[in-house]
Image (cartoon, rainbow, N blue to C red):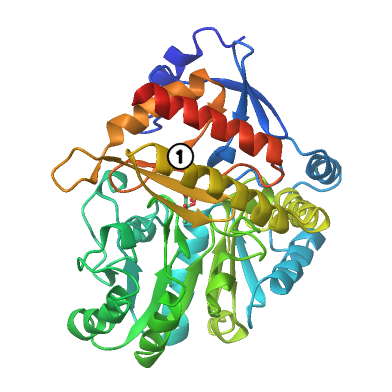
Amino acid sequence: MTDGIESLQKEYLFPCVATYYQKPLTLVRGKGMHLTDSEGREYLDFFAGILTVSVGHCNDTVNKAVIDQNQTLQHASTLYINEPQVRLAKKLAEVTPGDLSKSFFTSSGTEANETAVLFARLATGHSDIIALRHAYSGRSEVALNITAHAPWRPMPSSIPYVKHAHNPYCYRCAFGLTYPGCDLRCARDIEELIQTTTNGRIAAFMAEPIQGVGGFVTAPKEYFQVVLPIVRKYGGLFICDEVQTGCGRTGGTFCGIEHWGVKPDIMTFAKGLANGLPMGATIATPAVADSYKGLSISTFGGNPVSTRGALATIEFIENNHLADNATVQGGRLRDGLEALKAKYPSIGDVRGMGLMQGIEVIDPASADGKAPDPKKVLKVFEETRRLGLLIGKGGLYGNVIRISPPMIVSSREIDDALAVLDKAFAAVG
Ligand SMILES: Cc1ncc(COP(=O)(O)O)c(C=O)c1O
């Protein structure tokens, strides 16, 4: 059935639709923790469609809700009230922290972030956005300008109101300091960034609690508590991008930012919210949402099928305590990865939270002993694929392995994945 599909992909898709692996993998089926390729080989999925398949592939509960909705009402637009959209908005208000209570739905993380930036600017009347280096925000003009990775930016910067602060990347501190003796220099530096690159009035500070594409760069626990008073002092809101960290993935809480004990004014979701259905959500405080009374529409935003799928996904996460499972299994995964780090000098850093764990691959023989080694990552990729495990990668230098299985993962599957990673690192040296 899939004969020749690889050459058809080359012929008919934009080449920027890049695929993993020397010989691209064609997937034809998924169930739970597993995916099957066109040759009938089965893989344990530890990347979950880029942190998207929260509750397992082709989850029966989500499927049932989606099929039922497909047979009832598929689309009528937001010009009419549809019940799943309203119920999802209510649910998001319940599971997000602080005063976040009004939602605007779209079809992707890009649009969710675009909406967040637009509303921060409308609500404050200010323009400048402080983003973080190594951020990934999506692929619209605004999101590409916020994205701070040259390889993901096809065009030069075009939006002068976006300024990038140093990210809290402790393993490669831009200031050459070491946490906690650094006194959070990267966070405090944001004040000078505002004073020197803006007119002293900003619309927002925008950040992912853990930078996803950036290679699971995880902010120290005090980071946001230091940054937010600075942001507020200059009139800015906090936009928290939960596209990767949301829905329980970081363990224990629904939103990643709750681990830092701060309250965003605007939050964005996509990816894992609807287990793979196209879905973007921007939730804001009433003060932000109500600041604009004019018109805005997203044809597919709030689509009854996607919103019903998102509701079913959140309920499945809650009913099966998957945020707690992320804590337990994430802890097991982390312990195993730390053990691999102790064993293999090419693993320089292990970081993340819950079921969002990254390993930074380095060349220990390099001048500073920690030069990024993206080539080794590619070798580990080929080996793990051969052994039946799918993983992800990221980081500005392409040298971070991202491990984030569906949140239904069991201890046995964690151990199996760790055993494969062990073999892969042993094989590549
Ligand atoms: C943190 C973050 N925000 C936004 C996006 C953009 O989401 P989408 O690809 O659904 O537009 C991504 C995608 O990877 C992301 O990781």
Q: Quadrant of residue 252?
A: bottom right
Which residue shows up at 41% across the image and 88% down it? Answer: 229
Picture layout, residue 107 above or below residue 176: above
Please give left or right for residue 200 compared with residue 268 in the image.
Answer: left
Which residue shows up at 47% across the image and 47% down it? Answer: 338
Circle 1 packing at 10 Å, graded few (<14), some (14-19), many (20+), is many
Q: Quadrant of residue 289?
A: bottom right
Q: Position of residue 40 (x, y in %)?
A: 64, 12
Q: Position of residue 376 (x, y in %)?
A: 32, 30
Picture layout, residue 100 above or below residue 37: below
Looking at the rendering, in which quadrant would you find the N terminus? top right
Q: Position of residue 73 (x, y in %)?
A: 82, 48
Looking at the rendering, in which quadrant would you find the C terminus? top left
Please give left or right for residue 226 compared with residue 183 in the image.
Answer: right
Q: Provide the secondary structure element on which disc 1 rests.
A: helix
Q: Position of residue 233 (x, y in %)?
A: 37, 92
| Three-letter code for the amino acid on which mark 1 is drawn | Leu
Q: Quadrant of residue 319?
A: bottom right
> 424 or 241, which is in the foreground?
424
Which residue shows up at 32% across the image and 77% down it? Answer: 184
Picture layout, residue 46 above or below residue 349: above
The answer to whether residue 208 is visible is: yes
> 429 or 352, which is in the foreground?
429
> Which residue carries the number 1 mark?
340
> 30 or 401, which is in the foreground?
401
> 10 or 408, which is in the foreground?
408
